[in-house]
């Protein structure tokens, strides 16, 4: 009789709904944080990686990387020929008619700061990335350049 | 309802209100218990709101709640504190009022108090986000909710024990629940 009474009292103290409420509250509290973090990482991935192709130190073409596209682009002038292949976020020289073929052997590049060089053609691919937050830094650099080369 | 019982009810509201103010002031003088989480409070004054919710009609509960809030703000002197506690208390009161419909079949006083504490923290956090214009503060919500669950269950157990005694007063309308 006594045991039954205490058990009844326990049932009064905590009910099923309480645990359900605690569980739902914990789940609900994590949902906005989850969405917020997902948005943040999405933003971080959008740091505009692009490849600059220069020949003889003149900018010929800029290709944006990481756009889920697969294509080739051919550069030729005065019998010099380089075929550039882009696969989503990677870039390589697929074929070239230079004599040492170093550019072809360098293979796929995808990270910012990497480069592919073809010395006989003076052909250069450099991968760069623009983070949206570094706008001030680039402005500063431009300012410095104007000071050095007025 | 005759005059004398109405007067008793007003006195009861006044006693609850003064107790709430004292509890709120005591809480402000206490050292921060959750030092790693600024803004998380014990919520002792929520005890009064829970008790009033179970012993008074809704209109008197609202009167008591805002009376307590305004007086606490005037005594302790904090305009920003008043905005925070206004948002938190209103949200928590609405949540507790809705959950009281499930009482006592499905949920106990402790559950209602837990939801109230968590909603109080949520309301305060929303105001903080609005005032500081910093949406990244929402990452802080899980911490506040877990602390709210802990303090809410403490307050819930306290009010469960207190209500057993309060119900013995003859002027309280026991038909409320």
Image: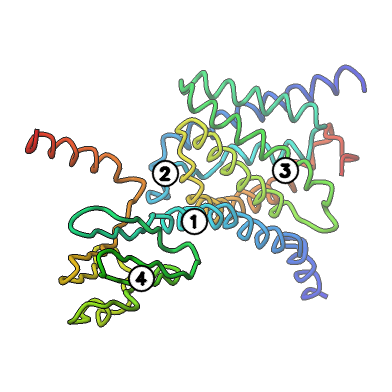
Within 10 angstroms of label 4, few (less than 14), some, or many (20 or more) residues?
some
Comparing labels 4 and 2, the label whose residue is closer to the camera: 4
Quadrant of the rendered image containing residue B66: top right
In the rendered image, the vertical position of residue A80 relative to residue B8, given as above or below: below
Determine the residue positioned at 79% across, 73% down. A2
Q: Marks 2 and 1, Cα distance to the nearest angstrom? A: 22 Å
Q: Marks 3 and 1, Cα distance to the nearest angstrom? A: 27 Å
Quadrant of the rendered image containing residue A118: bottom left
Instruction: Name the residue carrying label 1.
Output: A37
Q: Nearer the viewer, residue A146 or B35?
A: A146
Comparing labels 2 and 1, the label whose residue is closer to the camera: 1
In the rendered image, the vertical position of residue A98 relative to residue B144, given as above or below: below
Instruction: Name the residue carrying label 3.
Output: B95
Q: Position of residue B22 (x, y in %)?
A: 54, 30
CB atoms of marks 4 and 1 within 8 Å? no
Residue A84 is marked as 4
CB atoms of marks 3 and 1 within 8 Å? no
Comparing labels 3 and 1, the label whose residue is closer to the camera: 1
């Amino acid at each position: 009789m006594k045991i039954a009474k205490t058990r009844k009292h326990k049932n009064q103290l905590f009910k099923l709904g309480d645990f359900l409420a605690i569980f739902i509250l914990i789940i609900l509290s994590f949902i906005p944080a989850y969405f917020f973090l997902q948005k943040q990482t999405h933003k971080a991935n959008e740091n505009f990686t692009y490849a600059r192709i220069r020949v003889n130190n003149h900018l010929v073409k800029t290709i944006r990387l990481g756009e889920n596209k697969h294509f080739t682009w051919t550069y030729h002038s005065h019998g010099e020929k380089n075929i550039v292949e882009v696969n989503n976020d990677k870039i390589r020289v697929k074929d070239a008619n230079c004599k040492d073929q170093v550019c072809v052997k360098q293979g796929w590049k995808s990270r910012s700061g990497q480069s592919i060089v073809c010395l006989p053609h003076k052909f250069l691919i450099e991968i760069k990335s623009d983070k949206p937050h570094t706008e001030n830094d680039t402005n500063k650099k431009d300012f410095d350049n104007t000071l050095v080369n007025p | 309802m005759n005059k004398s019982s109405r007067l008793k009810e007003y006195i009861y509201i006044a006693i609850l209100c003064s107790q709430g103010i004292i509890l709120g002031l005591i809480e402000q003088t206490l050292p921060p218990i959750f030092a790693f989480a600024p803004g998380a409070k014990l919520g002792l004054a929520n005890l009064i709101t829970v008790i009033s919710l179970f012993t008074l009609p809704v209109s008197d509960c609202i009167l008591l709640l805002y009376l307590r809030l305004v007086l606490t703000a005037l005594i302790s002197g904090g305009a920003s504190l008043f905005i925070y506690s206004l948002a938190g208390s209103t949200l928590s009161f609405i949540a507790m009022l809705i959950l009281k419909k499930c009482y006592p079949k499905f949920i106990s006083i402790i559950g209602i108090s837990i939801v109230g504490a968590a909603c109080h923290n949520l309301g305060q956090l929303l105001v903080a986000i609005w005032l500081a214009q910093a949406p990244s503060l929402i990452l802080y919500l899980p911490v506040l909710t877990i602390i709210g669950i802990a303090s809410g269950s403490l307050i819930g157990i306290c009010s469960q024990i207190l209500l057993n005694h309060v119900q013995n007063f003859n002027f309280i309308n026991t038909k409320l629940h």
